[in-house]
Structure formats: C-alpha cells, structure tokens
C-alpha cells in the first residue's frame, strides 16, 4: 500500500491541473459531499485549493443522480467517456439505471483545427496529403473523442474514408487513466464492497482496450480478419482497407454507400424489408460468436449499414470480442441448459468457466433453479434476452465468479443485437434466432447426435476431460517446478515392504560389486601387472578369489532367504 500511496502522490503532483478540472466537474453536478467524504487531498496529496467545495456550484435539481453522472462523464472528455462506455458492459457491477445512462453516452466533440489535421496527416503518411489523395475533404463527416473521419479520393478514383487520430490523445488518455487508477484505489481502500469488485483489474483491462483502439493498425487487422472469415458469405460486406496508406494514427478504408440500419423508412423505400435485415444481421453476428469466436463487440445502429443490394456492412472495428472455443462450448451448454431447465448443467459449466472456485455450489444451483423457474412459464419467443442476460450477469457477480472479459463483451453485443432487431421488427425474438445456433454448437462439439440428453452430456463431459487432460497435466507440472505444490506422505503398515526392499537393494549392490571384481580381475590378469605367480598377476588371482567368496555368499543368502 505504501508503494501505491507514493505513486498516487507523484501522480497528484504531475496532474494537478487535470485533478482540479475533474473535481470541479463532479462538484458542479452535485457530488461535492461525496468527494469531501473521501478526503482526496489527504490521500493523493492534492492541495486543498484544487478540491472545490460542495457549495461552490449549484446543480440542476431536475436531473436524476445517474443523469448527473452521465453529464459529468461527458463533460470530462474522451477517456472518461470511453471508460463509461466500457463499464456499461458490466451490469453485474453497476445498477441498471446507471447502465442505461452510460449506454447513452455521446462522444461527439468539436473537430480539430485544419492546422492540427494537416500535422496529423503528415505524421501518419510521412508525406503531404496531395501526394496521397486526388481529393480530400477537410470537413469531417464524423467527429468523436479519439478520432474524426473525412472523405477522400485516391489517385486511382477509389472513394475512401480517412480516420485521423486526434493530436496528443495518447498523453491525454494516459493522464486520465492515472487519475482513474487513483480514484479506484481510494474507493477500494475506503469501501470493502468496492474492493471485492476488483475495479483495479477492470481499469487494467480498460487501459489495454483503449490502447489498442488508438492504434489503427490493430483496427485494420480486425477488418482483414473479418474479410477472411466471411469471404464466402454473400450477405455481408466488409470495407476494403488500404494498408499502404494506413498507420497507427491514420486509417484509410473504402467509403461505403448505404442506409443506416435504424432508418426503416428509407429501407422500405429502397425495397428492403427491415424484417429480413433483422434476421440476416442477427444470423451474421451469431455466426461471428459461435463459429468464429471473433465478433463485432459494438453492433449499435450507427455501426451497421445496409447496402442498396441488401448486404449488411459493419463499421468501426475498433472494439471486437474474442471467445475461445472452450468458452463457446460452455456458453452453448449454459443456453441449452436454460432451454432444457437443467440447473445442474448450468452450474457445472459456470464452474468450469470461472477462473476461481465457487464458495457454495448448492446455493448457486438453488439461485439458478429459481432463475429458470421465473422464466419457465414465459413463451420462448417472448423472453427479453437483454433482461435475462443482465440478471444472469448480476448472479455471476453475486457468487463472485471470475469469468474471462470476453464474456461481458458478448453480453453487451447480444443486448445491442436484440435492441436493433426489435427496432427493425417488433416481433423479433432473439431466443428464436439463438436456438438453432446453440443446438448446432452442441452437436458439433463433438458430432454426437440422436442420443438421449443425459448420455449426450455425459459423453461431452468425458470428451472435455480428455481434451483438457494434457493442459491440466502441464499446469500441474509447472506448479510443482515452481514450488506451488507440496505433497506430504504418511506411511502406515509399510515396514514389511521396506524390509524386503532393503534386502533387494543390498543383494543388487553385492551383485554389482561382484561383476566389477570379475571384470577388473580379468583386465589385470591380461595386463601382466607384477607381482606375478606362475606367469599370472597375483592381484588378478586375489580378485577372482574374492569374487568367488562373494558370489557363493550371495547365492547362499538367496537360497536361504536371509538378509545380506
């Protein structure tokens, strides 16, 4: 803790101005009393003058507490907005009302100046934009917190979208993440409940996520992966990336003409049925999840276009989710267990998915059973998947299960998917679309079909055990080498066995000595080493005599069964 405190003080001194801005915004929106109770200036060594008092600014009384949180985050800028959007994936930690507000966070900001734009483009291309584009529109078509997008045309006539990173965004994000770390550390220090949530690990994960999002070469790689995964799928279109013009700060991709998925009226005017779009888009995302394990993690309406020929085009590949094969299998088992009302099956899969042990299997099984029963009388088509997933995530948190981060990105993607689907088709049912994918996954892991339910899952458990056995064995050996496992034995009733072992070892030792004497004596006799008796070395003769005595003694001990 001393090291963390020293680091916090150092950050407090380096980021005094930003601390003052952040604290002023929170006070402005009515959180001054809360901040005063934390004693921030004492913990972070921030001068008292940088901590505004609660009465300094009047707050809008008509806004709810969670609306004020959202407004404060929006005013604090890119890093806090991204962190709020990131935390909206965690309904297991935050209350539903706050999740709703965080999902409405807007990061539209004023575009960068023309001078800054030109500097960033020059830095990204390492040459003037006139040598890269035949035409470039300096007025952005979209302006967000991390980057803005412009239209352009390459010398070959290709229309392109140019995504340009904002200047000094890395420094700004790094400063704000340092401050977020400090606030989280302070909350964990003062509140035991917060400490149990593992927020520091969440900030670590957020830092890794936003660092990747600010590197456009990573996003370009994501787009190329999607193009490869769906190269034979005619219903999806992934924009082409011009890798020769793409760098960490500039992404040049094909400009796609289409209709936003939320514009149902325009879709109908173009002769496209929104219901078909809902089913087709859902099918594509579920394929990403269950087949590829690599999916678009933010499929909100602004990131989905419908081309005029009916194909669906996803935009903004900065945020993707990765679901390993084992997790995909367990996810299918969990969903199938819900359909079959099998709580023990769900609990078993949750146990295998969790990175730590479960305190009470019986209590978890009871809660899962209760959870299933609440939805047992509801028609499958009428189930609100978003609400089910939120409650399921909350139950996971309540039992302190630690699952991989991709699980929560998956929950967010499915919730967003259901919202888009119902906007396009009021009768849309995500559970209906999910069922065939889940059934297919169950039968493909392994391909065991047409067997009774219990036998089927027993075989699956056996196959999973065999599949995981090499990894678990390697992990056990690694722990033994690192001293992580210590085994103590207590011997009982082994005295006769030990006595017999002693006899066997003694006889074996004598046999080895006997063989060595015979071989050595033979070598000495052939060497002619003096002294010599009748032309034979005396040492060799003595060796053979000794070997004869030992040999007869060993033979007699074996015959009589005595200890040597």
Image (cartoon, helix red, strand yellow):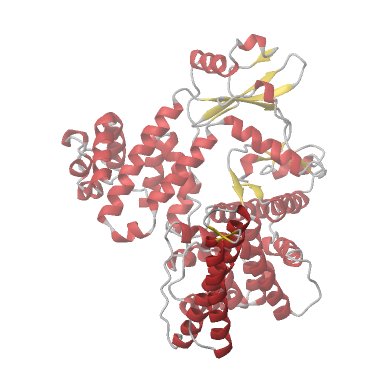
Position in image of residue 232 (x %, y %): 83, 43
Position in image of residue 530 (x %, y %): 53, 54
Report which quarter residue 425 is drawn in: bottom right
Asked if one can make out residue 61 in the rendered structure from this viewpoint, the answer is no
Q: Vertical placement of 496 versus 481: above or below?
A: below
- Relative to residue 447, is residue 474 drawn left or right? left
Residue shown at the point (43%, 72%) measured from the top left: 359
Position in image of residue 342 (x %, y %): 62, 77
Q: Residue furthest front?
A: 534
Q: Nearer the viewer, residue 178 or 515?
A: 515
Q: Vertical placement of 367 versus 355: above or below?
A: below
- Relative to residue 307, is residue 343 drawn left or right? left
Position in image of residue 561 (x %, y %): 54, 88
Report which quarter residue 27 is drawn in: top left
Residue shown at the point (37%, 41%) measured from the top left: 72
Count the marks: how many?
0
Report which quarter residue 30 is drawn in: top left
Q: Vertical placement of 316 versus 321: above or below?
A: above
Asked if one can make out residue 269 in the rendered structure from this viewpoint, the answer is yes
Q: Nearer the viewer, residue 384 or 247?
A: 247
- Relative to residue 347, is residue 194 drawn left or right? left
Q: Nearer the viewer, residue 505 or 161?
A: 505
Residue shown at the point (48%, 52%) measured from the top left: 100
- Relative to residue 101, is residue 49 drawn left or right? left
């Amino acid at each position: 803790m001393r090291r963390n405190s020293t680091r916090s003080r150092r950050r407090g001194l380096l980021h005094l101005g930003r601390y003052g801005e952040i604290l002023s915004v929170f006070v402005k929106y009515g959180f001054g009393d809360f901040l005063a109770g934390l004693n921030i200036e004492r913990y972070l060594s921030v001068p008292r003058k940088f901590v505004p008092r609660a009465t300094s600014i009047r707050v809008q009384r008509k806004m709810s507490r969670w609306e004020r949180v959202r407004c404060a985050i929006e005013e604090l800028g890119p890093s806090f907005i991204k962190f709020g959007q990131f935390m909206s994936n965690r309904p297991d930690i935050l209350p539903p009302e706050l999740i709703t507000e965080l999902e409405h966070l807007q990061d539209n900001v004023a575009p960068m100046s023309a001078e800054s734009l030109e500097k960033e483009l020059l830095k990204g291309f390492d040459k003037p934009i006139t040598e890269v584009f035949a035409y470039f529109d300096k007025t952005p078509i979209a302006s967000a917190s991390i980057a803005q997008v412009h239209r352009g045309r390459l010398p070959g006539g290709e229309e392109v979208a140019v995504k340009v990173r904002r200047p000094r965004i890395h420094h700004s994000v790094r400063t704000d993440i340092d401050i977020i770390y400090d606030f989280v550390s302070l909350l964990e220090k003062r509140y035991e409940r917060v400490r149990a949530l593992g927020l520091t690990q969440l900030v670590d994960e957020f830092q890794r996520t936003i660092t990747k999002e600010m590197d456009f070469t990573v996003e370009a790689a994501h787009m190329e992966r999607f193009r490869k995964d769906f190269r034979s799928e005619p219903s999806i279109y992934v924009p082409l990336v011009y890798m020769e013009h793409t760098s960490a700060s500039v992404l040049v991709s094909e400009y796609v003409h289409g209709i936003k998925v939320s514009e149902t009226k325009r879709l109908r005017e173009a002769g496209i049925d929104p219901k078909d779009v809902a089913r087709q888009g859902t099918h594509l995302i579920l394929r990403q999840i269950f087949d590829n394990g690599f999916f678009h993690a933010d499929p909100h309406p602004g990131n989905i276009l419908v081309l005029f020929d009916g194909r669906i085009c996803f935009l903004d590949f900065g945020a993707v989710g990765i679901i390993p094969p084992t997790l995909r299998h367990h996810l299918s088992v969990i969903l199938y267990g819900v359909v079959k009302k099998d709580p023990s099956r769900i609990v078993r899969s949750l146990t295998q998915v969790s990175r730590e042990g479960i305190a009470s299997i019986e209590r978890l099984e009871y809660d899962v059973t209760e959870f299933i029963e609440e939805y047992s009388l509801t028609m499958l088509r009428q189930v609100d998947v978003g609400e089910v997933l939120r409650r399921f995530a909350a139950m996971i948190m309540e039992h302190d299960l630690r699952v991989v981060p991709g699980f929560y990105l998956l929950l967010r993607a499915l919730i967003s998917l259901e919202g888009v689907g119902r906007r396009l088709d009021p009768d849309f049912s995500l559970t209906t679309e999910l069922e065939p994918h889940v059934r297919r996954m169950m039968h493909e892991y392994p391909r065991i079909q047409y067997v009774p339910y219990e036998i089927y899952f027993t075989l699956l458990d056996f196959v999973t055990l065999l599949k995981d056995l090499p990894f678990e064995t390697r992990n056990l050996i690694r722990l033994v080498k690192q001293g992580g496992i210590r085994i103590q034995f207590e011997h009982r009733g082994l005295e006769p066995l030990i006595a017999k072992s002693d006899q066997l070892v003694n006889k074996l030792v004598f046999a080895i000595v006997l063989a060595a004497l015979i071989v050595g004596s033979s070598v000495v006799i052939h060497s002619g080493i003096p002294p010599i008796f009748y032309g034979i070395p005396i040492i060799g003769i003595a060796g053979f005599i000794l070997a004869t005595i030992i040999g007869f003694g060993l033979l007699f001990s074996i015959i009589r069964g005595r200890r040597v």
